Image: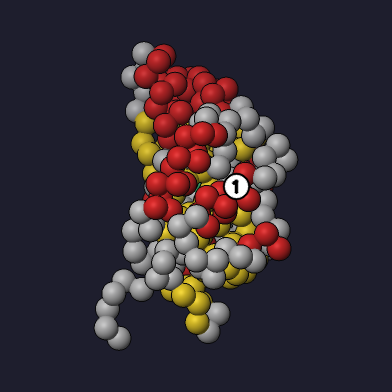
Amino acid sequence: MGRIFVVGMGPGGLLDMTPRARKAIEDANLVVGYNTYINLIQDYFPDKQFIRSGMTREVERCRLVLEKALEGYNVALVSSGDSGIYGMAGIMLEVVNKSGSVVDVEVIPGITAASAAAAVLGAPLMHDFAVISLSDLMTPWELICKRIECAAQGDFVICLYNPKSKNRSDYINIAREIVLKYRDSKTPVGIVRNAGRPDQASVITTLEDMPDNEIDMFTVVLIGNSQTYTENGRMITPRGYDV
Ligand code: SAH
C-alpha cells in the first residue's frame, strides 16, 4: 500500500516551498492537483507523473488519490499555500476515514496566502488577526457576515480569502461596509494578487478607496486594525513596542 502526502506547496515559487514539501513531491510516484497548481510546479519536477483535475472536483480528486494509494502509489496531493487552510487536508482525511481504509496520510504545511501577502505589504499581521473566506459555496453568507462583524468589532486585522468570483462580485463590498461600521475610512487595506508568483501585484489603499481597486479570486485582502498605518509604502500594525 502506498502513502498519501497532502502537500502545502506555498504560494507558487520554489523558494517559498519548504524542503519537506519539495521532498514529498520528489519522493511521490504520482502528483495530483488542481490545474492551476500543477501548472505552477510542473517545471520544477519534470520527471513526475501528474494528474490534473478541475476546480470544484475536490472530493473526486481525493477519492482518486485514495484509489491510487491503495494500488501502491505514493501520491502527493498538492494544495496551494497551506494544505490545511482552505486546502485539501481536511477533505482527504474525511475521504480516507469514510472509506475505512488504513492508508497513512501525512499533512505537510506550507506558507499560506496571508503570510505571503503580509510579507509583500510590510508587517500588517503583527497583532491578532482573523482569517475569513468570502466563499459561500459551503458556508451560509449570513454566517460569513457575522464573522466579519465580530472580527471588526474585536479590532482584529482581517484577512479575506476568496474575496471575489464571478457569482459573488458584491461580497467584498458588503464586507467593506460591515468593517466601516467599526473602523475609520482611512484604515489601511493591502491587496495582493498572486503573491509569490511571477505576476505578483500589490497595492496599499484605504477602506475608503478600496472599491477603486480590482479584486479577484487570486487576491487576498488584508484590512488593518485601528492601529495599522502606512509609511514609506509599507503597511505596519504596531505590536506596541516603544521604538
Ligand atoms: N490553501 C490556500 C488557500 C486556498 S483558498 C492557502 O493557504 O493560501 C483560495 C484563496 O486563497 C484565493 O481565492 C485567494 O484569496 C487566496 N490565495 C491563494 N494563493 C494566493 C496567492 N498566491 N496570492 C494571493 N492570494 C492567494
**Residue 118 visible, this angle:** no
- Above or below residue 102? Residue 139 is below
Q: Residue at x 61, y 65 (%)?
A: 208
Number of numbered discs: 1
Disc 1 crowd rating (10 Å Cα; few below 14, some 14-19, many 20+) is few
Figure quadrant of residue 239: bottom left
At which x and y percent is residue 28?
Answer: 48, 38
Figure quadrant of residue 72: top left
User: SS for tag 1?
Assistant: helix
- Above or below residue 69? Residue 126 is below
Q: Is residue 214 left or right of residue 4?
A: right
Does label 1 point to a residue whose CB lies under 8 Å from ligand 1?
no
Q: Is residue 126 left or right of residue 167?
A: left
Task: Name the residue type under label 1.
Answer: Ile
Q: Nearer the viewer, residue 220 or 32?
A: 220
Report which residue position mark 1 lands on.
174
Q: Is residue 105 left or right of residue 10?
A: left
Q: Residue at x 41, y 23 (%)?
A: 94
- Above or below residue 139? Residue 120 is below
At which x and y percent is residue 178?
Answer: 52, 50
**Residue 131 visible, this angle:** yes
Furthest-front residue in this view: 181
- Above or below residue 120? Residue 67 is above
Screen quadrant of the N terminus = top left
Q: Nearer the viewer, residue 186 or 228?
A: 186
Q: Residue at x 63, y 50 (%)?
A: 173
Q: Residue at x 54, y 70 (%)?
A: 186
At which x and y percent is residue 191?
Answer: 59, 62
